[in-house]
Amino acid sequence: MDLDRTCAKMAALNMLWRNVDSTIIWGDTLRLKGRGGWATVSTILGGQLRWLPEPEAQKLLEDSVRKMQPQPGPEPAPVIVPAREGKRGQFEMDL
């Protein structure tokens, strides 16, 4: 993702030249606003470049942010450490 359209386009062309699957979004990271973008798909003949319109780029950006947020799940069970009696008759615990 890049705010500057020229830099985003250069990144997309670099991924196309390297024949790598990628999605480059042109937009503002801090405001989470996608203005457009490019998707590259690797092929035997050297790859394909496809323009992403603003609504599609915005949806991809929102989906990627949603995936990075922690998912609620069950809390881990507490670990119970038994105490044991030491050599001098005192109780010890390993923490």
Image (tube, rainbow, N blue to C red):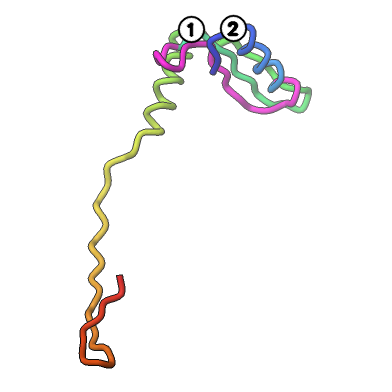
Q: In the rendered view, would you say 70 is above or below 73?
A: above
Residue at x-position 21% and y-position 86% = 90
The tag on residue 35 is 1
Looking at the image, residue 58 sits to the left or right of residue 94; the answer is right
- Sort mark 1 into few (<14), some (14-19) or many (20+) by Cα contacts within 10 Å: some
The magenta stretch spans which residues? 16-33
The foreground one among 33 and 87 is 87
Q: Position of residue 92 (x, y in %)?
A: 25, 81
Residue at x-position 23% and y-position 78% = 82
Kindly state the secondary structure of the residue where label 1 is placed.
strand
Q: Position of residue 44 (x, y in %)?
A: 76, 28
**Residue 65 inside the magenta-drawn segment:** no
The number of numbered badges drawn on the structure is 2
Identify the image quadrant of the C terminus: bottom left
Q: What is the three-letter code of the residue carrying label 1? A: Arg
Distance from disc 1 to disc 2, alpha carbons, whole Å, reads 9 Å
Q: In the rendered view, would you say 53 is above or below 93?
A: above
Residue at x-position 26% and y-position 67% = 79
Q: Position of residue 36 (x, y in %)?
A: 52, 9
Identify the image quadrant of the N terminus: top right
Q: What is the three-letter code of the residue carrying label 2? A: Arg
Q: In the rendered view, would you say 53 is above or below 74?
A: above
Q: Position of residue 15 (x, y in %)?
A: 69, 22
The foreground one among 58 and 29 is 29
Front tag of 1 and 2: 2
Looking at the image, residue 21 sits to the left or right of residue 3; the answer is right
Q: Are marks 1 and 2 in contact (CB under 8 Å)?
A: yes
Residue placed under numbered mark 2 in the picture: 5
Residue at x-position 25% and y-position 74% = 81
